Image: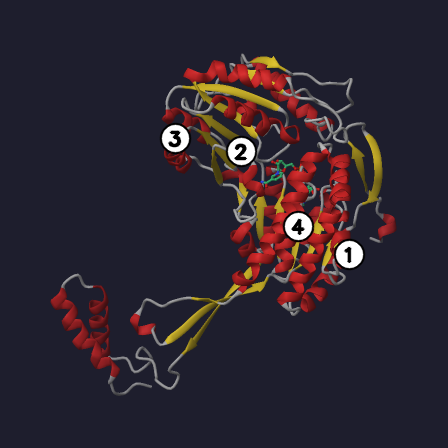
Amino acid sequence: MPQSAIAIRKVFSTDPATGKVLREFECASSEEVAAAVDHAQSAQKLWREVSFSERISVFRRFQTELHRRKDEVAAQISLEAGKPQVEALLTEVLVVLDAASFYIRYAKSFLRPERVPHGNPALKTKRGYLLREPQGVVGIISPWNYPFSIPSCDVLAALIMGNAVVLKPSELTPSAALLLRELFNTAGLPPDIFQVVIGDGLTGAALTTATIDKLIFTGSVPTGRRIATAAAERLLSIVLELGGKDPMLVLEDADLDIASSAAVWGAFMNAGQTCLSVERCYVHRKIHDRFVELCVEKTKRLRVGRGSDPESEIGPMINQQQLNIIESHVADALAHGARVLTGGKRLPELGPNFYAPTILVDVKHNVGSNVARILIEETFGPVLPIIPFDTEEEAIALANDSDFGLSASVWTRNRPRGEAIAAKIEAGTVMVNDVITCFGISEAPHGGVKSSGLGRTHGRSGLEEMVRTKYIDAELLPSIPKVWWFGYGSEFHLQMKGFLDLLFSKNWAHRARGAAKATGALFRKGRL
Ligand code: NAD
């Protein structure tokens, strides 16, 4: 069907603090997405041949330019996503600047051929090594909650490995992606190697079925499942960075002042719209009441307002759908006997999408029983349910009683104990005495287990996703025929049984007999 016969779909960049439309965009059609991928494919053939030092130069210029325009970038992110500008500076701009440093520093050594030593003595005359080659065109589909840092880190990892990229940003926050492309243009990245296609879920679906070689998806579990199904059809390699329901475990010996501040920041930063947000807080019963008191007191002191106001600490929700989810989770928790100690309501006097940071108690979590949605579904809003526990084993069981497994945290003055508990929690990352900041550690892998996703972004593991590993094996004595080649027979069979005895028998006499038999194979006659 010609494009003109198809209804043109549009997406709207909106200021969530006011509901005002900032800019509208036409959605890229599937033909436009396919064309972008085609152009990227051609461009990638040249980019993969560009010297590594030239790629690094582009990255350095990108970093310089981003640093120079940091305030403008942070302001743009804040306007479109609602978060305080200082949060945009720290959790978006700084994270990307640091990621660029990591790739500049580390990527060359990662790409060096890696020797694969051979243990089998019969194969010692070979030299094996790994080459890491670019995947080709990497498709990236990203969400709205970190509209700059999430796609940028993936774009940087893909480009430094010699890939081209087609990015489909969230329909709610396209401007941040356009800024990213502009920064790369200014840095001198050759044309077509990094392209942005704007649109809704249909545009994303078109990218999934286009001829990309790898897909990095960050978003919700339901969309992730749809993408995995489409990718399975054509065996497209994918990474899925999905939602979370991250638990925070506060042990009886934790520093209560520090842990309560961390809970409040971890639950309410970016208005709770963070995949790594503290969504469930389990506190030892001995300290529960005091901990709750501190959290309530600190939450009441938070300033809610527009991201452009430097005094604001909590911005708006991204839109009404998000507010509806939060409200329904709180209502369901109340129906299950929970109590709101602070918040629990919209703040219409501030704008259409504001919700007060909320602390809930008496939310019962008995493993295996009918628990409130707020303890099992991702809320993605500024709501902190605090639940007491009695024993360490119970705390671990509660933390693990979830379909999700993105990250978790353990709070204790006894670090070895915290690390031992961390090892028992089912999650991609567990922090001891910190929350969320793992995302900003460029060297650390990011990703989840269970419904929280597949594969990893960031760090060395993230780079592994951007390459195809090729194993090269070269024979060092090519003029000597192999012992195991044709010319079989009963004698050869016995010699080879002897060889296996030599290698694996636990009996030394057996081994010695095996060695004697196997040696004969080196001189056997009738070999083809
Ligand atoms: P979403 O799943 O609604 O959308 C994510 C992206 O997928 C958007 O660009 C959207 O247009 C696109 N999309 C929608 N349908 C599609 C389809 N059928 N095919 C291809 N693309 C499609 O998620 P969201 O609301 O933008 O983001 C919030 C979610 O993302 C939360 O669940 C959050 O936990 C998760 N998230 C995870 C991480 C992580 O690193 N694990 C980070 C940030 C956000």
Q: Position of residue 359 (x, y in %)?
A: 58, 18
Q: Nearer the viewer, mark 3 or mark 4?
A: 3
Residue extending furthest toward the right: 4
Name above or below for residue 285 compared with residue 452: above
Residue ID at (52%, 20%): 386
Q: Secondary structure at mark 2?
A: loop
User: Which residue is tagged 4?
Assistant: 140
Q: Position of residue 508 (x, y in %)?
A: 14, 65
**Distance between mark 3 and mark 4 Cα atoms:** 41 Å
Q: Say which amino acid is labelled 3.
A: Asn
Q: Say which amino acid is labelled 1.
A: Thr
Q: Position of residue 7 (x, y in %)?
A: 84, 44
Q: Secondary structure at mark 4?
A: strand
Name above or below for residue 72 compared with residue 502: above
**Distance between mark 2 and mark 1 Cα atoms:** 35 Å
Taking the image as shown, residue 372 lies to the left or right of residue 154, namely left
Q: Secondary structure at mark 1?
A: helix
Occupied quadrant, residue 480: bottom left
User: Which residue is tagged 3?
Assistant: 414
